Amino acid sequence: MNAYVSAAQLERDGEAPRSLTHRLSLGLVWLAIASGAVVFTEPAPIDALLMGLVVLLPTVGLVAFRRELIGYLACWLLIVVAAVVASGAAVDVARASTHTFVTLYLVLASFILAGFVARRPVAHSRLILNAYLVSTILASLAAIVGFFALVPGAQEAMTRFGRAAGTFKDPNVLGPFLVLGLLYAMHLALERTLLRALWPLATAALLAFALILTFSRGAWANLVVAGLAYGYLSFLTARSNWYRVRLMLVGMVGLIGSVLVVGVALQFDAVTALLSDRAALVHGYDVGPEGRFGGQEKALELILQHPFGLGALEFANGHHHEDVHNVYLNMFLNAGWLGGLLYIGLIATTLAIGFRSILRVSPARPLLILAYSAFLGHAAEGVLVDTDHWRHVFVILSLVWGLVAVAGRQAAQWSPRRDEPILDPVLVLPPSRRMARVLAPAPLQLAAPARRAARALVPLLPSRRSPRILRPILAAPEPRRRLPRTLRPLLIGEH
């Protein structure tokens, strides 16, 4: 049997032909993720669909329960239990309990989606990302229509405080929601030829324009962190220098496009006025005892005084006029010391295990880099805003953990096709007539034509008595069947 299998073949191995139920289930997953564009109220349409998927996907066998995912779920359940205990101390127990129940639902949905990704990593991840991209396009169009009042009544419904909110309740949530879609559009541009890359680039420009109109400083910082992480990790793990060159070219196009988008936005007076105001790092409402930073100081004092927490939503209910605007402090307030420490541990573990999995070669690694970078951006933004109930954050978590759960198995099972440049040629220097010494393996990559040419030269190589000469010998699979007996000692080993 051929030892080299493609990513598509690996995805198909052990997969039964798709039934009608299977196809309908995949369609419901796509619809659920795409419906994430509409979050006017709670519960939102995505909530009803995700709750249905929690029951449906395990029933039809589209979930793989891996050991890593069980640990992920266990950590979240401990956080939920700690939040339930803290809710007993809340003034409004019903409100705090409802908030905790929503957290539990989001945790279960994220766990099931992660298992769905682990079932068929590449195919299911692309299904989710394609639906997510559609949802970001719809939300961006709504934001632009609302901001510029292109439809009567749209400005009142789709803006908040003069900032584009689109189909979201808060522009500070819409902005970060667009980050993963923007990264995925750039990722598609990297994968495609020049002409086919025009559509993803145009989509990225649309999403960037809508993100600017949200005037969310946290979203801007989120995009910078996520974009830099994606570029660095993609460059680090690139399989060829040509891909690195392509990555730099697309990055330059994206940077130039961002400047052009900002230039176009500044042509509108309303954008110029808001942008000059929002570009400041610190505003008046950030400082002082009743400002954002003052509220975080109050939160720290309350955390030290209440090891079991205050209960969900209690900080803004009786201790400050707004939320704490820091998800890490918020988790300590909602779930006590235990819940807060577990949440920080979960974030740190996700970042650590995700990075380790990225270093493993697998067909799903580019998608893991994409999801990991988006998560890193949201983890950084969590210092500025409460992200504990953002639906799209749990979708990103499911992508990261679903891909992490199979990264090790894929690295062990998968090897590229024969036409992919993965085998390393070996440089051999026979220093004398009596022995052949291996100089060093050269980390070069030969495509199929180069390998075939090297194999054709094998019978022509000189014997041990020939003069010193430097020649490449390809250490191909099962080389002992291909090389003359006198040349076999020159091999480092079978690949």
Image (cartoon, rainbow, N blue to C red):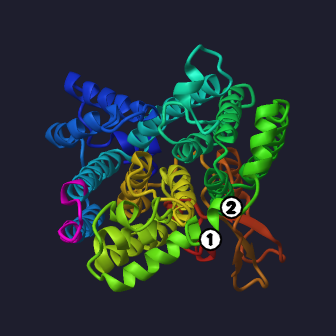
Q: Position of residue 195 (x, y in %)?
A: 73, 25
Q: Position of residue 50 (x, y in %)?
A: 28, 39
SS assignment at label 2: helix
Would you call the spot at circle 2 few (<14 residues within 10 Å), some (14-19), or many (20 or more)? few
**Residue closer to the observer: 337 or 115:** 337
In the image, residue 90 lies in the stretch drawn in magenta: yes
Residue 6 can be seen, yes or no:
no
**Relative to 83, residue 162 above or below:** above
Q: Residue furthest top?
A: 152
Q: Which residue is mark 2?
A: 284
User: Left or right of 319: which side holds 172?
Assistant: right
Q: Position of residue 194 (x, y in %)?
A: 75, 30
Q: What's under tag 2, amino acid-wise?
A: Gly
Which residue appears at 66% of the width and 63% of the height? 236
**Relative to 396, residue 333 above or below:** below
Query: For residue 31, which numbered disc appears in the image?
Result: none
Q: Position of residue 58 (x, y in %)?
A: 18, 43
Q: CA distance from mark 2 to mark 1?
A: 8 Å
User: Left or right of 453: which side holds 302?
Assistant: left
**Residue closer to the observer: 12 or 490:** 12
Q: Which residue is mark 1?
A: 288
Determine the image quadrant of residue 210.
top right
User: Range of the magenta residues?
Assistant: 84-95
In the image, residue 116 lies in the stretch drawn in magenta: no
Which residue appears at 49% of the width and 66% of the height? 326
Would you call the spot at circle 1 few (<14 residues within 10 Å), some (14-19), or many (20 or more)? few
**Relative to 466, residue 175 above or below:** above
**Relative to 252, residue 32 above or below:** above
